[in-house]
Image (cartoon, rainbow, N blue to C red):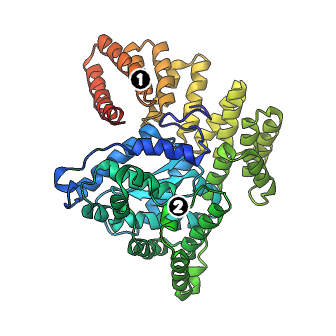
Amino acid sequence: MQHHHPARGHSFFPFFCRRSLAFLCIISLLLAQCWVLPAHAAYWGSIGMKDEKEMGRQFAVMVRAKLPLIDDPEVKLYVQGVVDTLAKTMPPQPFPFVAGVILHNTMNAFAVPGGQVFIFSGLMMQLDSEAELAGVMAHEMAHVTQRHMASRMEKAQAVTMGSLLLAVAGLALGGGGAAAVGAMGAGQSAMLNYSRIDETEADSQGYQYLLKAKYPPQAMAQGFQKIRQKSWIGGGGSLPAYLSTHPDLGERISNIMARVQAAPASVRNRPVDNRRFMRVQTLLWGRYGDEATALHRFDAEKNNIALAQMGKGLVYTRMNNVPDALQAFNSALHLQPNDSLILREAGIFHYKLGDKHLADQYLRAAMQADRQDYMARYYYARLLDETGRTREALPYYQEVLRYVPEDSEVHAAYARSLGQNGQTFLAHLHLAYSALYINDKKKTARLLEKAKGIQRSASDTQALRKFETIYKERKEIWEES
């Protein structure tokens, strides 16, 4: 759970791949797998809701196996909350909408059949309000509720899971589906791209979701405009395919704004509480933004000075400027001594600095202020281990893993703690989980065999069976890669 490391699966702080071309290569390799849809759905057939659920599940497994996701609870729970707010405005759906945040500077979001919604961190960093974020997400979620991708797949010949996922890669990364064309052929790729009618319907239906969720509806047009403007000036990667494929973007935005003007003033002037949005945006800029740009943003902040100071502390930490980082964190704590996020980040800073007393003080205060913050619990568990209180640490690791069961570094830290407490079987099993979630095939197999050799109880056998079920699914991904 380092702040920066190469993309290796599911982790709080994965490597921030800044080059869109490199990211395109990664996702293209990921999505080039050819898992065929059920026979009745693969050739000019009907794709049922069960098939859509399976597609969404497989897609989520592959994304988590291959791409860097952000699992900081401040970010993850916030985005899921926005998705839930929009989902409540929809007719009953056969699957829940589940959000994930991909760590990349592309300004985009996308959703796939089965209700999997993915937002790029670059989108959240460049928009100005929660309403704008919700507007873009409502559009993408409408593609799912209106079954646009599934319907187009039904019309395409011999569509495989790989074909679907390559099409999604094109939609997600821009360029009109170039990644899909390379592996599928232009005919099928064109068939899987959203049509003008699809886009218009997603605009219209998404507008209704946004309206019913009590957001100011003009935020959808504002979000699209910012994506287009910032993409053109190089602020967020290439122009997303769903905004660039058809030449009528201006017309679409005009249509949205015409509907906005017809809405009552009370609807257009709805207030938006951006406090949580600003907290998340501060965290993302502090952790991953260009250092000079981030410091400029924080220096210019006039309303959320405490958060801006915390953000500066994060940036200075990345720059190995300990004196300025310490000063910034102290300033943030002075201004907002009870803010859970500031307490947590100050605690992590002092933990890494080696000041265990202050780390203990701030992390415990953060946990008390926010009982959902499993990151604070993770660092507190590590602190307990390092101060000889390993038995006390175990319940904290267990709680963290309930929230992030696929985090390699949590499993590794938990395994070390289990080993120190004499629980050898579980220690080896969680080391195997750690290897599994960084896609280390040989190490996973070796550790699994060791765990099998020392299992003793019925609970050990049950734990092994659970692992082997997950391992089997992950091996299928490895074999298809």
Residue toward you, 363 or 109: 109
Q: x, y percentage for residue 360? A: 66, 29
Tell me if I can see residue 93 in this picture. no
- Write down the quadrant of residue 379 in the picture: top right
Q: Which residue is mark 1?
A: 430
Kind of residue sitting beneath label 2: Pro
- Write down the quadrant of residue 114 in the picture: bottom left
The residue carrying pointer 1 sits among few (fewer than 14), some (14 to 19) or many (20 or more) residues within 10 Å by Cα, namely many
Name the secondary structure under disc 2: loop
Name the residue: 22% across, 54% down: 42
- Alpha carbons under labels 1 and 2: distance apart: 40 Å
Q: Is residue 424 left or right of residue 363?
A: left
Kind of residue sitting beneath label 1: His
Name the residue: 38% across, 44% down: 32
Name the secondary structure under disc 1: helix
Tell me if I can see residue 387 in this picture. yes
Q: Is residue 134 above or below residue 447?
A: below
Q: x, y percentage for residue 230? A: 65, 62
Q: Which residue is mark 2?
A: 240
